[in-house]
Each structure stands twice: as structure tokens, then as C-alpha cells.
Amino acid sequence: MLDYAVLLTTQPSKVKAADVARLRAAGFDDRAIHDICAIASYYAFVNRIAIGLGVELEPRFE
């Protein structure tokens, strides 16, 4: 799962059907695979928005 999430986050164009098949083989159903994809994609999206807007962390989170 983590390998898939990292690949999706860092090199999304390299995600292939075989990557999803490995998740299924590891026991993840379609709903879980969707959730993994959605969560990883959401965090990547939010981080890119924050970086693009120059948002800085509050000191307590540094």
C-alpha cells in the first residue's frame, strides 16, 4: 500500500494496472483501493496548493 501511495504521489504517470493488481493481491478490495488513491491524491493536492501559494507552517508545527 505504501509503495503505491509513494508512486502515486511522486510519479503518478507511472502508476499502472499492475500496481492496482498488487493491492488486490494483498487483500485490498475496490473500496479500500479507492480510499488509498483518494487520500494520497488529496494530500498531494493540498500540499501543492499550499506550496504554490507560499503558505508557511505555523511555528508550532515546525
Image (cartoon, helix red, strand yellow):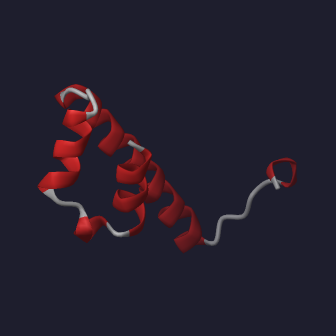
Q: Can you give x and y, in whole percent of width and height, for residue 22 in the image?
A: 23, 44
- Identified at 20% across, 26% down, the residue is 29
Quarter assignment of residue 6: bottom left
Q: Can you give x and y, in whole percent of width and height, for residue 57 in the image?
A: 75, 58
Extreme right residue here? 59
- Identified at 26% across, 39% down, the residue is 23
Q: Can you give x and y, in whole percent of width and height, for residue 31 in the image?
A: 22, 27
Image position of 4 (left or right of 2): left
Quarter assignment of residue 56: bottom right
Q: Is residue 55 above or below residue 32?
A: below
Q: Quadrant of the C terminus?
A: bottom right
Quarter assignment of residue 37: top left
- Identified at 57% across, 63% down, the residue is 50
Q: Quadrant of the N terminus?
A: top left
Label tally? 0
Q: Nearer the viewer, residue 45 or 54?
A: 45
Q: Nearer the viewer, residue 20 or 59?
A: 20
Q: Is residue 15 above or below residue 2?
A: below
Extreme left residue here? 17
Q: Is residue 3 above or below residue 51?
A: above
Q: Can you give x and y, in whole percent of width and height, for residue 41 in the image?
A: 37, 51
